[in-house]
Amino acid sequence: EYGCISYMIKVIAYGIQLVLTPVLQKLRSKKQHTASSLDSLAALSLALQMLNGCATSSRRIVLNIAIHQALQMEFFTPQNVAQLDSVLNRLSDIAVFQEELQESTNCDFLFWSKELLPNYFADIFQNPEYANKLQYLFAALRDIIPNFEKAIHDQPQNFIENFKKEIDSTIKDEIIFKLCRDIETDLRFHIHSQQEGSVPHFDPWKNGVKDLSKFLKINPLKFHDLNIDIKAHVSHYLDSTFYNLNTVALYDWQTYGEMRSLAYEKYGLSLQEVHLPGQTLE
């Protein structure tokens, strides 16, 4: 992105040079110079110098002043004047594009509306097809960090840590914990439904169907040094749950093995095998 903008600025600067250089050469070829022609000569030389470098705000101001001084000469046609005005405006627009884009897309205001986060997370959980929006939300939440770093009445790290804990707690309560329970329930339903008469037939028209795997396919969510890997959280929850329940009912080891296999096939979760003794001594 930065390279593209830099290239566009160079192209525009080259176009301005093509207009100014012939005029500068004509002016230098004159044998006699008046005070105004010397001023115009200096202005043109200065304008060309400003084009050889970064298009900073100060350089653009000097460039505009120098060109407007040089335009007082008779060497410039009305077409040249109109062309230069258009190109200078375009140069200013492109030079400040990155700064204006960053300012217009800054989402630090979300910190002052953080009460909306639980509702937003809850809505995303009810509509898994929008799970990828979580990555964009976390990118927007990171915009407040530069403001935290400017704090002088308290340590910036305190603000970052408090907000980080709040985000972590909210997404776990509204998405991760619910997702763990729903995936466990889904696995249990599919396995036990294979046993005739154990579970009533599931009606998707009445109960609805949600593709919970969408949450497991997104990349880890990042805020400062906080990484939230939803897939890892779900895997750990299922590993712990299956192990604890299997230790209570050793005879049910085959059922939990089938649930692990189904978790991999349906959700892409690689769960740990439970290695428990086949019998105990009393």
Image: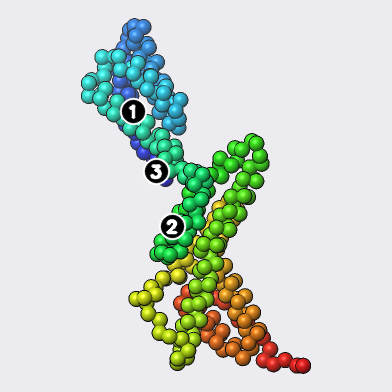
Determine whether label 3 and label 2 are within 8 Å by CB: no
Above or below residue 39? Residue 153 is: below
Q: Which mark is residue 4?
A: 3
Q: Which residue is situated farthest in the left direction here?
A: 78
- In this view, the residue farthest toward the right is 282
Is label 1 in a helix, a strand or a loop? helix
- Decide: is 113 above or below 250: above
Q: Which residue is mark 1?
A: 88
Q: Which mark is residue 133?
A: 2
Whether the residues at callouts 1 and 3 have beta carbons within 8 Å, the answer is no
| Side of 78 where 169 appears, left or right | right
Nearer the observer: mark 3 or 2; the answer is: 2
- Residue, x 66% and y 84% (percent of image)? 247
Distance CA(mark 3)–CA(mark 2): 27 Å
Q: Residue 169 appears in which quarter of the rendering?
A: bottom right
Residue 275 visible, this angle:
no
Q: What distance separates the C-alpha of mark 1 from that of mark 3? A: 18 Å
Residue density around tag 3, few if under 14, some if 14–19, many if 20 or more, within 10 Å: few
